[in-house]
Image (cartoon, rainbow, N blue to C red):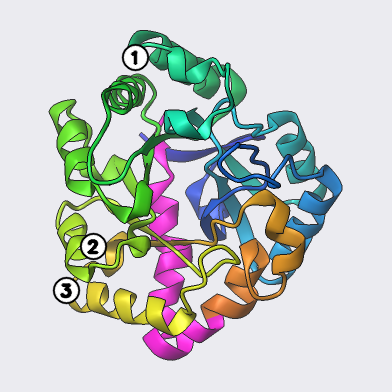
Amino acid sequence: MSRTIRTVLGDMDPADAGAIDSHDHLFLSTPVLPGDGPFDEASAASELRAFSAAGGGTLVQWTPRGLTRNMPALRRISESTGISIVCATGRHRAVVYPEGAREPGLDPRLLAAAFTEDIVKNACGLIKVGVGPECIAADEAGALHAAAVTHHTTGVPIAVHLEEGSASTSVIEALRADDVPERSIVLGHLGRNPSVGRILEAAESGAWLCMDTPSPRHTQNVDELARILATLIERGHLTQLLLGADTTAALLDAARPLFGPSGLFASVAPRLSELLGADAVRRMLIENPARAWSFDA
């Protein structure tokens, strides 16, 4: 069976994805980030044109249900810019939602039905679940179970927001209990955990590790990121590494050319290539994500 990446414009051969920003947000609105209201469509298209000019081919948007992911606009932007966009279904942490939002109140059965509908009818290509620091709340465990059910129904990969880069062991245990293979799990924000030992522990699981590059909100410099990546590579984990700019919507205009999707390729990747070698960076931006975001439909 051939593998595919599901984009907002339909299924794509992974070989056609090009260089991939594995974690970003063109549209996002949440009360925990005041001032980061819905990003206007023209500015998002401008950012993706800069992303294309810098060498990007595909962007993976992790904004899940209920947080203004704006799928009609994503389709228009993908069509106008030629950039492939992979959009998330899923559910973030309850605290991230505005008061009265529907998603935090759905039980696992209803969540799984909503996730599956998003994938089958709305062309979503990943299931994103958010979990809190250090431990998984009961409702987050329910969302992880719903993601596992949906994964077994559709094959789509599961991406997990790890608050402060923690709780990866608990997440892996929960998804293993539901028979989700590690190579269908993408762990996000691990680089925000100050303990390299904890990052290595997560790496030993065999799951994909999506490492955040510097952004206006998280100003770890590229050299610090390179040191973490070098340690992971030395321990044999290069084939699990992905890179994502994870820049919130309202900051994209101000982020260029250092941060954001375009900055990932214009500024961050060249410096990482100097420090780690071009082959390692190519794997993290092209070969690895083509496997991580593809599935047997």
Can residue 116 be seen from the camera position used here?
no
2 and 1 marks in contact (CB < 8 Å): no
Q: Which residue is mark 2?
A: 199
Q: CA distance from mark 2 to mark 3?
A: 11 Å
Q: Which residue is mark 1?
A: 108
Q: Residue at x 41, y 89 (%)?
A: 275
Question: With respect to residue 249, does 120 lie above or below?
Answer: above
Instruction: Find numbered disc 2 in the image and state the secondary structure of the residue it sits on.
Output: helix
Question: With respect to residue 54, does 19 lie above or below?
Answer: above
Between 160 and 295, the residue placed more toward the observer is 160
Q: Residue at x 14, y 37 (%)?
A: 173
Q: Main secondary structure of the magenta part?
A: helix
2 and 3 marks in contact (CB < 8 Å): no
Outermost residue to the bottom: 274
Q: Looking at the image, is mark 3 or mark 1 nearer the viewer? A: 1
Q: Which residue is mark 3?
A: 235
Q: Determine whether, in the image, residue 117 is placed left or right of residue 277.
A: right
Between 211 and 132, the residue placed more toward the observer is 132
The number of numbered discs placed on residues in the rendered structure image is: 3
Instruction: Find numbered disc 1 in the image and state the secondary structure of the residue it sits on.
Output: helix
Q: Which numbered disc, 3 or 1, marks the residue that appears first in the sequence?
A: 1
Q: Which numbered disc, 2 or 3, marks the residue that appears first in the sequence?
A: 2
Residue 50 in percent (x, y) is at 75, 65
> Crowding at label 2, few (<14), some or many (≥20) Cα neighbours within 10 Å?
many
Question: Which quadrant would the C terminus be assigned to in this image?
Answer: top left
Question: Which quadrant would the N terminus be assigned to in this image?
Answer: top left
Q: Determine whether, in the image, residue 19 is placed left or right of residue 200.
A: right
| Residue 195 is inside the magenta segment | no
Residue 89 in percent (x, y) is at 51, 29
| Residue 285 is inside the magenta segment | yes
Q: Which numbered disc, 2 or 1, marks the residue that appears first in the sequence?
A: 1
Region in magenta: 270-297
